[in-house]
Amino acid sequence: MFGAVSQRRVAANLGLGGETGTTAAIFRHNPLFEQFVNQVGDGGVGKLGEFRGKAVSRSDGHLIIRPSLRNRIDAGAIPEEGIVETDSAKADGSLGKQKTAVDAVRYGRSVNPELGGYIVSPDRVPVPEPVAVEFINPNIDDDKKDAVIAALSGPALLLVEGPPGTGKTTFITELVLQTLRADPNARVLLTSQTHVALDNSLERIVGQSGMPVSAVRIGQEDDERIAASTRKLMLDAKLPEMRKQALAAGRAFMERWALEHELRVRDVRRAMALERHAFLKTRLEEVETGMQALEPQLTDANRKKLTADEMDAIEEQLEGLSKERDGLERVLKESMKDLATYVDSKEELKEFAECSAADLREWAEAYAAQTPAGGQLKQLLQTHAEWETAFGRGKEFQAAVIAASQVVAGTCLGVMSIPGRNDITYDLCIVDEASIATPTEVLVPMARARRTVVVGDSKQLSPFQDPELKALGLLEKWGLKPEDQKATLFNHLSAHLPAALKKTLTTQHRMLPAIGDLISECFYGKELRSIERAPAAHLTGVMPKAVTWYSTARKPNRGSRSQGTSFYNDAEVELVTNLLSRIDFYIQGGRNKDKRVSVAVLTGYDPQRQRLQTAVQTRGNQWKSFSEVFVNVVDAFQGREADILVFSVTRSEVRGLGFLKEMERINVALSRGKELLAIIGDHAFCQAAPGAKNPLRDVIDYIRRNPQTCVIEEVAP
């Protein structure tokens, strides 16, 4: 994928835009990658500089990049031309974590040394006796009760199939709370391949359980995929509050000590402020020196000499120092404001600001009384200032917060980016969305726990399969088949674990029964049971039926057009925006016009996504009824939900269904909507498409057999 753009010379205009401190880089080409390095000359000296960042959007041959925090050259110093190439540092680090986990499991170094044997031969996993359980959630369904009982009995491995809307989050919440109620000192590792699923579970466990739960969310502070509701649980949010409480207690102790020894509290406070400022200055100098020492190790030449683990450690160390430097600079400004309350003039404050750390300590000593108590105070001041400067800033404090937490939550690979990761063990690991993780990704959290529960859905999308592997002949080179790319540990365990260690959730709550019954029959062999409920009042009558296929079969411009190896369909783009406008008009004309609904517009093709996104952005300012309109490809929406789901089929008047014949993709596309499901496309083409595998034909047949809840409405030419 990346070879075509690697080393390509491009023109680049860089400038500030968006939020303060955010730089947008616009490159005149259309690369399909996220991490990049723009290598540029430094004004003719001959030394290469690097400007790093993450691609956040691309369209019409333009690429917009969010700069990395670790850039070593200023954006303004970059010339208009440079070389764009992929930055594989993070990918190398991820592969390193997976290799470490594989080796640990293979050679019996995992927390459960029997894990490797159980994975090779799942049928050997012992089945413990069921335990009696008093359920915390009084409304939990019987199928989820059965799964919780099986998990609490303590098997080394348990698999739970959770089809759409069957309450995976409810099951996970009950299991975690039961585990902590039985042993408050237990440590649970909660992981997932998607941030949405992870945050849903964590929010329920912490905020809606009625039990005090100590939890920490692992993730990058600038990752927009992390929900606002769980950001307060991130390390960067928890440490400042922890630090604030500890520092307040330390200062109160110093003041009590001063009063007990008949020292002037104001002088002690001034001395404390001076000592603190001195230590902050000293620490900032140490941090900057440490960053400068790491710089030579990050050159391209040196990177080639290091292993992925070594490179990951250096990158992590540099990132930690960079964050500490930024924090120290902020605290130094606050420290000056604190000092201002103890000085008599601006001139004196200015003198303190320009003082070296050694001079500041001499000033602090001057405010200590020349008595035995004053001598003790000097020692206390130095100890307190050093402690106050360091407390809550280093990796060891992060490790302490994590080790003291009952629940640690993060993505499968993200949880191994934490400090002290190799020293922390877990009693229980829960891997949600395990069916869309590769085997090596799942092993990363599993290797750190005594027992594991994997939760997923084998009838939805498997891990991403890169078509380039087949195109470049890599599969053939290594003796692999295309289906090997789809192999998951989840499916392996599903096929071979004892029956008692495989549970399926079958009670569906999320989707209106009209949608849930379609999903159950077309994709799950009628095994799902939808709980009866009334449709949302403000959406009743918005569409002819809760499931409506708006067919373009009679439209002369119904055909899709190709773009490279993909497709787009302008007729469907127009129908999507017209449908959303009608829905908005209907809601605004009703009694519930203040209600807001979420909408997801999905397609299987990226050129269609781009056109849909542009159309929605153009018309969106006219709509008042939607809390959000999410437009994306099907694969990107797995694990999420919306009140209204609109699926643009896109393909028409071309040969075959392409990957729309994959049952898993159509299952995901149609099972995300809670209240309404609209399908827009040429139903005649979909039904007549050749091939034994045609899930859309099954959907059309179901719609025709269930006119009370579903309808096909042919759009006029």
Image (spheres, rainbow, N blue to C red):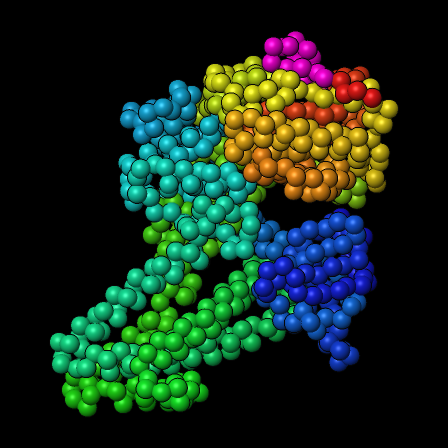
The residue under the point 86% across, 24% down is: 556
The residue lying toward the viewer, choosing from 579 and 551, is 579
* Horizontal side, residue 238 vs residue 312: left or right: left
Residue 459: percent from the left, percent from the top? Answer: 60, 26
- In this rendering, the count of numbered labels is 0
Q: Is residue 320 above or below residue 434?
A: below
The residue under the point 61% across, 56% down is: 90
Q: Is residue 447 above or below residue 156?
A: below
State which region is magenta: 695-713
Task: Report whether residue 678 is seen.
Answer: yes
Name the quadrant of the C terminus.
Answer: top right
Q: Is residue 358 above or below residue 574?
A: below
Residue 482: percent from the left, percent from the top? Answer: 72, 34
Q: Residue furthest right?
A: 556
Residue 424: percent from the left, percent from the top? Answer: 40, 51
| Image quadrant in which you'd find residue 710 | top right
* Horizontal side, residue 103 vs residue 340: left or right: right
The residue under the point 51% across, 22% down is: 537
Q: Is residue 710 magenta?
A: yes
The residue under the point 54% across, 73% down is: 291
| Image quadrant in which you'd find residue 73 | bottom right
Task: Report whether residue 451 is seen.
Answer: no
The residue lying toward the viewer, choosing from 691 and 301, is 691
Residue 35: percent from the left, percent from the top? Answer: 67, 56
* Horizontal side, residue 453 vs residue 100: left or right: left
The residue lying toward the viewer, choosing from 181 and 334, is 334
Q: Is residue 708 magenta?
A: yes
Q: Is residue 467 above or below residue 697?
A: below
